[in-house]
Image (tube, rainbow, N blue to C red):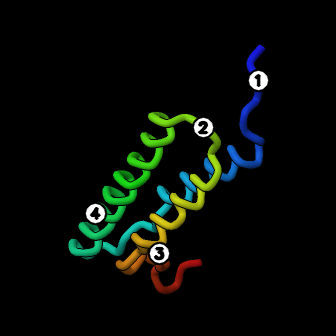
Amino acid sequence: MSEQTESIDAVMDLVAAIVEALTVPLPSLAPADERAHYRLLDNRTAELRATLMGVLKHPGPLDDTATIIRRGVADLPVTYPPFRFEEPEGEG
């Protein structure tokens, strides 16, 4: 039987940080905003991949891995206006 090396809370915090990093609002329909959305996801994914590769390459306690991911997200904020759904006049 394998020994549990991380608390479930630490693992869940890491999973939550990953989900937060990859969850960004859809952009407005403007082409520049769509490009900004793509770049943001691409940059966040690259940052996340690098952090997780480090965890895999140097296994050990997760310690502050979730915090490192959240700092990376803070360094790559949403800078485009999000898509806003508006119902046509007379509906709803």
Secondary structure state at the residue bearing disc 2? loop
Give the number of the mark in front: 2 or 1.
2
* Residue 60 tag number: 2
Question: Looking at the picture, which amino acid does disc 1 mark?
Answer: Glu
| Pointer 3 residue | 85
Around disc 3, counting alpha carbons within 10 Å, would you say few (fewer than 14), some (14 to 19), or many (20 or more)? few
Label 1, label 3: how far apart the Cα atoms are: 49 Å
Quadrant of the image for the C terminus? bottom right
Q: Which residue is mark 1?
A: 3
Q: CA distance from mark 2 to mark 1?
A: 13 Å
Where does the N terminus fall, quadrant-wise? top right
| Disc 2 to disc 3, C-alpha distance | 45 Å
Question: Counting residues from the N terminus, which is met first, the one under dot 1 or under dot 3?
Answer: 1
The number of callouts visible is: 4
Three-letter code, disc 4: Arg
* Relative vertical location of residue 76 with respect to residue 63 in this rendering, above or below: below
